[in-house]
Amino acid sequence: MQLRLMYVIIAVLAALVAALVGSVVTVVEGGRPTAAFKTGALTFAGSLTLLVVVMGALGVVGS
């Protein structure tokens, strides 16, 4: 059980890093802060969904 929790925490942290990178890239390219926030939120949602699907396929999470 603890190993699964560790993988879930790593997936959330990886999604947060992806969101942060997406926001920084938007700001560096001259985007507005609201666009950076939107990009970060969409990146976080997309990457977390992808990571959960991959972990489910590998049998890490789920039943």
Image (tube, helix red, strand yellow):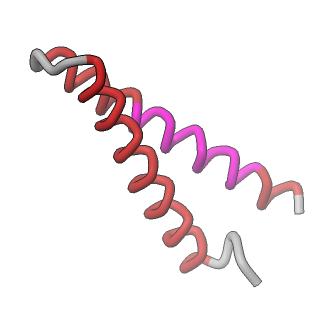
Image vertical order of residue 53 relative to residue 42, above or below: below
Q: Is residue 17 magenta?
A: yes
Single out the residue that lies furthest toward the bottom. Answer: 63
Residue 41 location, x and y as percent? 41, 40
Image vertical order of residue 48 relative to residue 15, above or below: below
Q: Residue at x 68, y 54 (%)?
A: 8
Q: Main secondary structure of the magenta part?
A: helix
Residue 31 location, x and y as percent? 15, 20
Q: Residue at x 75, y 49 (%)?
A: 6
Is residue 31 shown left or right of residue 63?
left
Residue 55 location, x and y as percent? 58, 68
Single out the residue that lies furthest toward the right. Answer: 1
Residue range (magenta)? 6-19
Depth order, front residue of 46/54: 46
Is residue 54 shown left or right of residue 37?
right
Depth order, front residue of 47/55: 47
Displayed quadrant of residue 20: top left
How many numbered discs? Answer: 0
Q: Residue at x 24, y 29 (%)?
A: 35
Single out the residue that lies furthest toward the left. Answer: 29
The quadrant of the rendering that contains the N terminus is: bottom right
The quadrant of the rendering that contains the C terminus is: bottom right
Displayed quadrant of residue 62: bottom right
Displayed quadrant of residue 26: top left
Residue 32 location, x and y as percent? 20, 18
Is residue 7 shown left or right of residue 42?
right
Image vertical order of residue 46 relative to residue 18, above or below: below
Q: Is residue 27 magenta?
A: no
